[in-house]
Image (cartoon, rainbow, N blue to C red):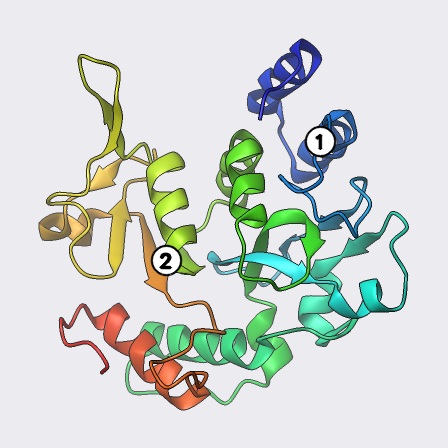
Amino acid sequence: MRKTMEQIVLEGQVAKCRSIEELYVLWELMQQMEEDPFGNTCYPELDQRNFHVDGIADPEHYDGTLYILKETNMRKMIQKGETMPVASDIRADFLSGKSPSGRVEYLDYLTSMQKILWEEKHPGEECRLPGKKLREKAAVLYINKRGGKGAADEISMDYGQYYIEFIKKQIRLLNPKTVVCCGEDLFRLIVMEVFQNKKQKKNREIYMKWKDLVRGDVFFADRDYRPVKETKKDEAEVRVVRMWNPSYRVNNGQYVSLEEYLKEFKRRLSGKKEKME
């Protein structure tokens, strides 16, 4: 999708943002200026002015863990005809477990991953913190700030490409140490666009520099967001974990259970090569 000159100028201001609040002001304005987003970066059932505020759940307890998902599911609101502009604070929803459209999806998965990460930092100790206390330590970022329907289509990823400069800046402002991408396509988008993991050939073809950098399911980077080889992962400041979307289905059409999902998450963190059948 093309961008107007006004949008290009606005996008150029992103690098100067010093806070999430500044970034969101530009982001909302950019959304409103977008020409004909419907079917491209916005579902026809939703107002293009929708904006979901996300980020650090509790600044006082944030430990540098960031979860990246595609979009908030607004299917129930669409069914009720509530398609007017919606401004919602996902940070509050993430902590409480409730949102205007009902219970926050996949909260059990995110909370349980938080428990695993806590125990990773405290070897030999069993985490007994309640769910809310665990989520206080995390941040959540939805790629599609307009929200969606939980559908298996490309609108959220198209939105992510269109607003990639905003997403890159938001991640840098959040300054995470561990990034969990809940989806293969999200992992590729973040590693390629945010962590400077691409080169340009003489014919100007852009390609990803996966070799020797992404082996297994964890990508490592330094504090300047430059790739670090897995052989030097102990020197890395940031790691990006490739995880399934919690709605992942296996060959028989069933959703992966929470238990199986967490078993796979532990495997990926450990760097073991075996994969679940």
Q: Amino acid at mark 1?
A: Glu
User: Could you say which quadrant of the image residue 208 lies in?
Assistant: top left
Residue at 10%, 45% in the rendered image: 212
- Does label 2 or label 1 sit earlier along the sequence? 1
Crowding at dot 2, Cα within 10 Å, few <14 / some 14-19 / many 20+, comes out as some
Read off the residue under disc 2.
184
- The CA span between labels 2 and 1 is 30 Å
| Residue 18 visible in the displayed image | yes
Q: Is residue 52 left or right of residue 66?
A: right
Q: Nearer the viewer, residue 118 or 26?
A: 26
Mark 2 and 1 residues: CB-CB less than 8 Å, in contact? no
The location of residue 49, given as percent across then percent down, is 81, 40
Residue at 61%, 15% in the rendered image: 8
| Residue 57 visible in the displayed image | no
Q: Is residue 142 left or right of residue 30?
A: left
- Could you say whether the residue bearing mark 2 is in a helix, strand or loop? helix
Q: Is residue 174 left or right of residue 274?
A: right
Q: Amino acid at mark 2?
A: Glu
The location of residue 182, given as percent across then percent down, is 45, 63
Which disc, if any, is residue 22?
Answer: 1
